[in-house]
Amino acid sequence: MRKHVTPLISKDAIAGRIESLAHAIATTTQGELTLVSLLRGSFIFTADLIRALHVQGLAMKVDFMVLGSYRAAMESSGTVMLHHALMDDIQGQDVLIVDDILESGRTLAVAKELLAARGAKRVRVAILLEKPGKRQVAIEADFIGFTVEDAFVVGYGLDYANQFRELPYIGVLE
Ligand code: IMP
Ligand code: MG
């Protein structure tokens, strides 16, 4: 049976927060930005964020990396797998990593290292959700959408066993 989801962050609250994030990102960015979206979880956040950044007058390139550690479970396996790296050269570029949720920090650490190794000039991070007190790696995001308590959340791109990504809001999986 499909699990129950209790709404936590509404569609409108997400939209409003993304506008503020886009403003904060735009006011601290000079020149062209390269957005690197970490799939799969951040695909919806990325789609909304890039359009909000456009409204703020920012031009950008968008690239993707596919990383995974969750394996049909609510606990991270602890190993981050790189399924797909970037399509384009990012040498000398101002990069903004876009991810869905920062928990242990392992995913972001791997992504940041890879981008630095490929010669990015600057690597910043925009994260939709942050779970405090769960960090295994000392890493922080530059832009944070919402801080959520220690619960397993789904929707707006986030999944449980690759389900619930389609929910327009974020909810707690019961
Ligand atoms: P980290 O590597 O532990 O920081 O985990 C980050 C990744 O774990 C995220 O990109 C998500 O894919 C996944 N994740 C962590 N917490 C949740 C959750 O509450 N719901 C869905 N996915 C989660
Ligand atoms: Mg993810």
Image (cartoon, rainbow, N blue to C red):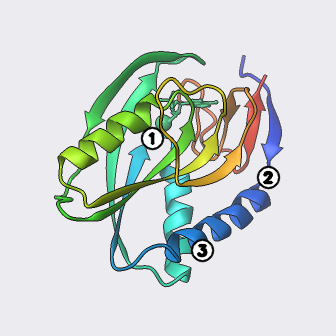
Q: Which mark is residue 143?
A: none
Disc 3 versus disc 1: distance between alpha carbons? 25 Å
The picture places residue 102, in percent across and down from the top left corner, at 55, 37
- The image shows residue 122, relative to residue 38, as above or below, that is below
- The residue under the point 71% across, 43% down is 147
* C-alpha distance separating marks 2 and 1: 21 Å
Quarter of the image where one finds residue 155: top right
Q: Position of residue 160 (x, y in %)?
A: 60, 26
Q: Secondary structure at mark 2?
A: loop
Along the viewing direction, whichever of 129 and 51 lies nearer the viewer: 129
Of label 2 and label 1, which has the lower sequence position? 2
Q: Is residue 154 above or below residue 51?
A: above
When the figure is inspected, residue 3 is found, relative to residue 154, above or below; the finding is above
- Secondary structure at badge 3 equals helix
Q: Amino acid at mark 1?
A: Arg
Q: Residues within 10 Å of mark 2 (few under 14, many from 20)?
A: some
Of the numbered discs in the image, which one, if any, rests on residue 10?
A: 2
Q: Residues within 10 Å of mark 1 (few under 14, many from 20)?
A: some
Point out the residue furthest to the front here.
138
Tally of numbered tags: 3
The three-letter amino acid code for the residue at tag 2 is Ser
Residue 5: quadrant of the picture: top right
Q: Which residue is mark 3?
A: 23
- Marks 2/3: CA distance? 20 Å
Q: Which residue is mark 1?
A: 40
Query: Residue at coordinates 43% horizontally, 29% vertically from top-left?
Result: 106
Q: Secondary structure at mark 1?
A: loop
Q: Is residue 110 left or right of residue 52?
A: left
Does ligand 2 reach within 8 Å of label 1's beta carbon?
yes
Percent across and percent down for residue 83 are 28, 32
Q: Nearer the viewer, residue 38 or 174?
A: 38
View extreme (bottom): residue: 57
